Amino acid sequence: MPAPTCASCHTARANLRRPRSGQALCGACFCNAFEAEVLHTVLAGRLLPRGAVVAVGASGGKDSTVLAHVLRALAPQLDISLHLVAVDEGIGGYRDAALAAVRHQAARWELPLTVVAYEDLFGGWTMDAVARSTAGSGRSRSCCTFCGVLRRRALEEGARLVGATHIVTGHNADDMAETVLMNFLRGDAGRLARGGGLGSPGEGGALPRCRPLQLASQKEVVLYAHFRRLHYFSEECVYAPEAFRGHARDLLKRLEAARPSAVLDLVHSAERLALAPTARPPRPGACSRCGALASRALCQACALLDGLNRGLPRLAIGKGRRELELEEAPRRSVPAADALTAF
């Protein structure tokens, strides 16, 4: 049976049917529609004001590659400037290849690139060193927890280094739905309460963050990269197979097979979620050590690093953190400017 004619241009043969709508489109019309939808997300959500200096979290993977490519195409309309910021977590045999892909993209698109490293920011700690430290602690499966917190801090520092006013990341709809599922499964009311919307406004001096691809499915991100002939790094992180997110991802795939709208349903559920007053998290304050935004005495980054430096990584996660914060209470707080070198 011959392919149908594109439903948009009515001239070319259709190359795909959009996973959610079933609309038959040629590759060019699909890419134009994808870009228009991202533009609408940014404008409708008022995510990036005119004149913004935008730090794009660049990992070399499909999501950040597509995000950078789309924002580069939309930059004249949005009146924004872009700067790629990549984080070197220190994962041997993995991150070097991914950073090579980022450098290739930056050179090809003529975008400035800055690379920040865990080792430089966090007192010599790399993810490989964290993995070795947690291997005998019963926390070896928590590498992604450590990495997620430290990566967020590193991206913030890199964005400030380049004078950015906003940070954008490549999280797509599937990523966000997985996060919502994980928070439900953990019973984490605090993160559920903060999980809605398209980003964060930048409380407590943190830079505003947004996710322009949050309403785009992973399938369409891959299709866009295919039709635009974008080259990206596609290997999975060596620590990812043991992460809890993998279980949420498998569950989400089964849910989506039974109900195609499951991904966006979860994303929108997080946006509309209302918690009882007793379940709402306390208003965030400042970390007693580094001054960063924190919901407890210590921000997550400081708690993680302190546990690692003491050789007790389990102090940084779960109930042990209370003990750490009780010890921290009498201490003199460290000025924010010295936060990342005070460990």
Image (tube, rainbow, N blue to C red):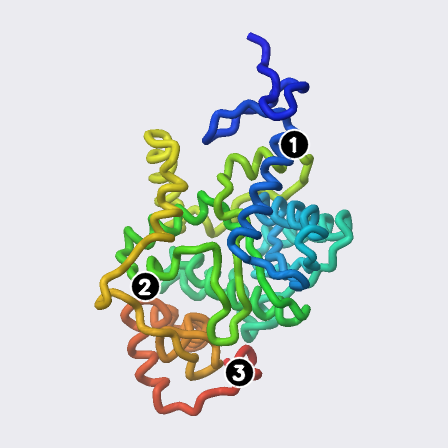
Q: Quarter of the image holding residue 140? A: bottom left
Near mark 2 (Cα within 10 A), the count class, few <14, some 14-19 or many ≥20, is: some
Q: Amino acid at mark 3?
A: Ala
**1 vs 3, front mark:** 1
Q: Nearer the viewer, residue 128 or 34?
A: 34
Residue 130 can be seen in this image:
no
Q: Residues within 10 Å of mark 3 (few under 14, many from 20)?
A: some
Of residues 123 and 194, which is closer to you in this image? 194
Q: Position of residue 149 (x, y in %)?
A: 46, 64
Which amino acid, mark 2? Gly
109 sits left or right of 8 in the view: right
Residue at image x 44%, y 57%? Answer: 144
| Apparent side of residue 222 relative to residue 200 in the rendered image (left or right) | right
Residue at left offset 59%, top offset 64%? 166
Q: Which residue is mark 1?
A: 227
The quarter of the image holding the N terminus is top right
Q: Secondary structure at mark 1?
A: helix
**Which residue is located at x 67 percent, y 40 percent?**
231
Q: Which of the numbered marks, if any, corresponds to residue 176?
A: none
